[in-house]
Image (spheres, rainbow, N blue to C red):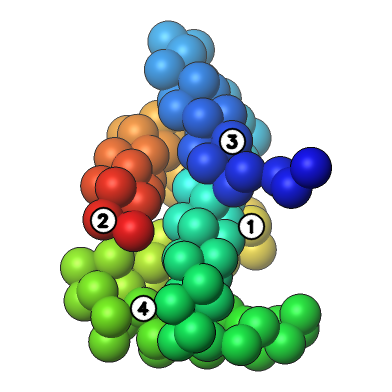
Amino acid sequence: MTFDPSEFLRLARSLATKSDLDEAEARTVVSRCCYALFLRAREALTAERLVTPTSSGRDHALVTRALQQANPFAGAVLGILRDQRNRSDYDLAATVDARLAREAVSLAQAASDEL
């Protein structure tokens, strides 16, 4: 059985609805939103033969570029979420709070709905 990347978005949404969301959870929400959209896009673009995954870090650029051409809105959202994920995962001084986490869920869901 294949993993459904929308499960990452489901988990992110569940965490983001917590009234006492802490920073680690907020950072996790942002990260999972980015990967949910990236993986959904990769699978959709692969099925449409618009990308051929390399199973390497290069896939992020390949998928983002192809998605921006195929669906500019979803491509822009993936770019935004990637920037937010990088801040959330690597910048310990960045402010990552419940508001940002909930925004990431909304963006990821809206873009995912278009795929």
Q: Count residues near mark 3 (Cα–Cα under 10 Å), then give few for <14, some for 14-19, many for 20+.
A: few
Judging from the image, what secondary structure is the residue with disc 1 in? helix
Q: Which residue is mark 3?
A: 7
Q: Which residue is mark 4?
A: 67
Amino acid on which disc 2 is placed:
Glu
Q: Which badge, 2 or 1, is on the more N-terminal residue?
A: 1
Q: Which badge, 2 or 4, is on the more N-terminal residue?
A: 4
**Hey, which quadrant is residue 57 in on the image?**
bottom right
54 or 94, nearer to the observer? 54
Amino acid on which disc 3 is placed:
Glu
Picture layout, residue 26 above or below residue 32 = above
Q: Which badge, 3 or 2, is on the more N-terminal residue?
A: 3
**Which residue is at 64% across, 57% downward?**
89
13 or 23, nearer to the observer? 13
Of labels 2 and 1, the one closer to you: 2
If the image is split into quadrants, where does the N terminus sit?
top right
Q: Which residue is mark 1?
A: 89
Q: Residue 16 location, x and y as percent?
A: 45, 25
Q: Residue 12 location, x and y as percent?
A: 52, 33
Q: Residue 17 location, x and y as percent?
A: 42, 17
Q: Which badge, 3 or 4, is on the more N-terminal residue?
A: 3
In contact (CB < 8 Å): disc 3 and disc 4? no
Q: Which residue is mark 2?
A: 114
Q: Which badge, 1 or 3, is on the more N-terminal residue?
A: 3
